[in-house]
Amino acid sequence: MKLSRIFAIFIMFTSPISMTYANNYSIDIEDAWIRAMPSKAMSTAAFMKITNKFPNEVKLISVDIDGVQSVELHKTVSDGKVMKMVKQSHIPLPANSSLVLKPGSWHIMMIGLEKQFPEGSVHQVQLNFDNGFKQNIKIKVKKHQIQMMHHM
Amino acid sequence: MSLKIKFLLPVVFAASLISAFFLLGNKDYLKLERSLKASFVLFDENKPLPKLELTDFNNQPFSNNDLKGHWSIVFFGFTFCPDVCPTGLMDMVKLKKILQTKKLQNPEIIFITLDPNRDTPEVLKDYVTYFDKDFKALTGTKEHINQIIKPFGTFYEVVLNDGENQKTVSADDPIPSDIKTYTLNHTAWMYLISPDGEIFAGLPTPHNPSLMAEDIEKIFAFY
């Protein structure tokens, strides 16, 4: 009883500190896009650049997108010649670094589209990380990423 | 010594004539192959393309004759594919633009489904023409598709997704009717088909449209 009270007081005093601590750090999302697909397509994928500004590794564990039956974290890997889209339990984001989710690599797979995702439309997406951090962003549906065209 | 030279000279002369005939008369595929950056010459006159009995996205029969008289690029995939196939088709859109600026003939882009179960002609038409109005798509029976992919060196396997669990089965295994979703692991090479209707070159992943266009230009000049 006494111990739990001490613990409660401890939590009361430490949690504002940890919140301030958390507020100094963030996970930034840039250049996000959902791939525009034909109207009858049953799946698509979301891509973006994720920058982890925390001093420790953070894992992207899930993504919420309205109108999608199942959102999975995937990585396209080439096993010799065969391209495999392998489901991942999480996407690791090392401390103070960026990871680009792009075609042919890491991506957020959207399976079972219950609504249309037409080119130009914007959708609310929530990314959930293992440290409790959540990032809400709006992502536009595009046919391709503009940046990719520069490599031509 | 001089006798030996007298004897050798005609032999050397004949040998150089024969090699000159082969170098000039026959096409030097090895030299072409060495100059290519993003593709491999696969042409083998002893391995003709098997008989195709496919259906196009307008429900019309498609045979080997439909590949003759023009260049084509054949690509195997499935429309449920969320990453590899749309990336490949976008690369084909870029390739088409580059070939147009080079004022080169555009090969016909042909997408052949590895998933005839879900990819009906209607689904295929909606899918490929979304990327480009000139792209074509073909389907056929699963057994026939599994046969015709072999000379291309294309391989696929089926990943059954039952909620949490994934199970990989062979391309020849039947897909259980109660399975929720499935995807395919597959090779994503593209194949350049010559106007003779034969496999000429293979373009491996990852695809680089600029390098592909350079190679195609060389292949067109060579052919």
Image: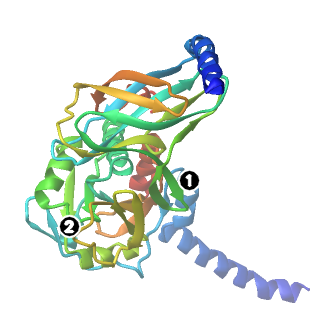
User: Residue A37 occupies which quadrant of the picture?
Assistant: top left
Q: Check disc 2 and report its element: helix, strand or loop.
A: loop
* N-terminal label among 2 and 1: 1
- Looking at this view, name the residue that lies furthest to the front: A1
Residue nearer the viewer, A90 or A83? A90
Kindly identify which residue carries mark 1.
B35
Task: Identify the image quadrant of the N terminus of chain B.
Answer: bottom right
Q: What residue appears at the point 42 percent right and 68 percent down from the top-left corner?
A: B168
The amino acid type, in three-letter code, at marker 2 is Asn
Badge nearest the viewer, 2 or 1: 2
The amino acid type, in three-letter code, at marker 1 is Ser
Residue nearer the viewer, A120 or B215? A120
Q: What residue appears at the point 17 percent right and 37 percent down from the top-left corner?
A: A115
Kindly identify which residue carries mark 2.
B117
Q: Is residue A147 above or below residue B39?
A: above
Task: Identify the image quadrant of the C terminus of chain B.
Answer: bottom left
Q: Check disc 1 and report its element: helix, strand or loop.
A: helix
Residue A11 position, x and y percent, is: 60, 19
Q: Is residue A97 left or right of residue B172?
A: right
Residue B14 position, x and y percent, is: 65, 81
Q: Chain of mark 1?
A: B
Q: Chain of mark 2?
A: B
Residue nearer the viewer, B220 or A122? A122
Mark 2 and mark 1: Cα distance apart in space: 41 Å
Q: Is residue B52 left or right of residue A145?
A: left
Q: Report crowding for label 2: few under 14, some 14 to 19, many 20 or more residues within 10 A (C-alpha).
A: few
User: Residue A32 occupies which quadrant of the picture?
Assistant: top left
Residue B89 position, x and y percent, is: 32, 47
Residue nearer the viewer, B58 or A85? A85
- Looking at this view, name the residue that lies furthest to the left: B59
